[in-house]
Image: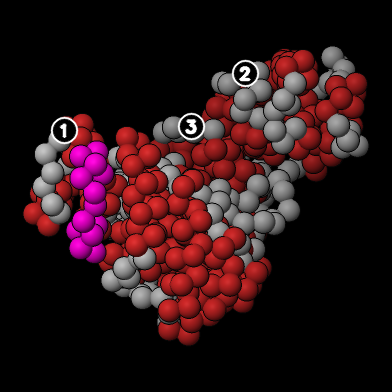
Amino acid sequence: MIGRRVSAPRVHGDLHALPCDPLAVPRGSASINAGCCCALRGGAQANHAPASGCVRAAASSRAGSPSLQPSAQLRWQAAAAQVRHAATWQQLDALYSSAWTAEVAVAALARLARLVVQPPKQRAERAAVRALCGRLCAATAAGQLHGLGPRQLSTLMWAAAKLPSIIADASMPWQAAQLLPGRLEAGAGSAQDVSMALWAAAKLGMQPPPGWLDAMAGALLQRLDSSQPQTLANSAWALASLQHDPGDEWLGAVAGRAAALMPQFSEQGLSSLVWALARLGAGQHCTAGSRLLAEVLQQAAVQLPSMSPQAASMLLWALATMDITPPQPWLAAYHAATAPRLRQWASQDLSLSIWAHARLRVRPPAGWHAAFAAASASRLPSASAQELANMVWGLAKLGLLPSSSWLVAWQAAMQTAMNSYCAPALAMSAYALALMGVRPSAAWMNLLLQETARQMPVFGAQVLRIMLGTWCLLPAVPCA
């Protein structure tokens, strides 16, 4: 049985945590992109296969820590050395030679991806960078991809994922991806190669067939003993982002390895790993997962004082999605560490955190709530529709009635964002107001009714039930 595809989780938003760059020093914090809400309440619910194809593939040829063969390693090091000292893309362009082999061209693409973090703003410079990228892609193709090893193939995919807007040949990353399972099955390559390829596939929005994903996940298991924290976090993140469930056995093995390495995890790797567990519905469903979560909480407690807003909010969101309430001392440490810094949090971070509190039914202390109220009030005008819905729903479920000035500012912001609401977020907001006993103005109610009527065709059964119940509590105002 192959791993199953994970349905989009029923959570407050379609979160996509961005993991550590596979070729970068693991620093910084994870970030997330919240999209349209999928439901008012619920967690990731994956249907795990008892023994997925990727686990069987790993068991058939478990290898310790395959790496590049000596000759291939030397060629790759020589290729990278030719472009390593280019400090700008212009210097890299000056170094370019039509005689470059495919290995050198791939190394140059990777260097270009490091040098061009964002596409140049000037049209002429952007065109020049794109032309250089085109020459490098052509040199790679001319050198024939099938002659490249797993490190070069995964690096090519990584570079394409870092340069999506200027890569010349959009089909080349998938051509490289198709060659990788065979290379890895033959015993070449490392855990980092597997992780880089999975990361790139997710970042590029590929839709690989389940067989490819199972083969890559199985290849990671073959190299599990040499896997490092970043490798584990990125691989789990990628599979979750690609909505592919590798099965309980794979998750248990990876969770066991991650637990053993927990002191070495950066905050970014930690938050990405927990996010992936939440998306895959793992954690509390296996012994290794339970042990991992205990280790995560212990490690996070150490990092809380310096943890970034994105990592802190997403960590609590992931725990809430898995219905795991941290011990009271841990929550006290969380509130003490984050309350003084809430004014620095973005609207997304604030909305995730209050949603998680409500989901866990954990009422924050008065000091934290006061800090949240002040911080969120300043973020309301720029908050997205989903963030506004998360905030008001979280406060309502916790029984925390905002001040009248906060509610006025929230209604003004929501009125501006009303037409961008998706159906569940619309229901979430209306339900929260009814729960609070708030009576919006007639003009605001008119907009709510009009938007409800517009979105009615896409309402699911749950949303319809909530909206009907809400209208019984909110004042009925006919549309103008």
Gap in angstroms between the C-alphas marked 2 and 1? 54 Å
Magenta-highlighted residues: 433-448
Residue shown at 90% from the left, 27% from the top:
91
- Callout 1 amino acid: Ala
Residue shown at 35% from the left, 57% from the top:
407
Graded by Cα atoms within 10 Å as few (under 14), some (14 to 19) or many (20 or more), the crowding at tag 1 reads few
Whether pointer 2 and pointer 3 mark residues with C-beta atoms closer than 8 Å, the reply is: no
Residue 74: horizontal and vertical position, in percent?
84, 39
- For mark 2, what is the residue? 169
* Residue 68 badge: none
Q: How is the image coloured?
A: secondary structure
- Callout 2 amino acid: Asp
**Magenta stretch: helix, strand or loop mostly:** helix
Residue 293: horizontal and vertical position, in percent?
46, 71
- Callout 3 amino acid: Met
Graded by Cα atoms within 10 Å as few (under 14), some (14 to 19) or many (20 or more), the crowding at tag 3 reads few
Above or below, 147 against 332 in this view is above
- Residue 434 shown in magenta: yes
Residue 177: horizontal and vertical position, in percent?
56, 32
- For mark 3, what is the residue? 206
Whether pointer 2 and pointer 1 mark residues with C-beta atoms closer than 8 Å, the reply is: no
Decide which of 70, 109 is in the foreground and name it.
109
Disc tally is 3
> Could you tell whether 436 is left or right of 153 in the image?
left
- Residue 458 shown in magenta: no
* Residue 480 badge: 1
Q: Earlier in the sequence, mark 2 or mark 1?
A: 2
Gap in angstroms between the C-alphas marked 3 and 1? 47 Å
Above or below, 436 against 128 in this view is below
Whether pointer 3 and pointer 1 mark residues with C-beta atoms closer than 8 Å, the reply is: no
Q: Secondary structure at mark 2?
A: loop
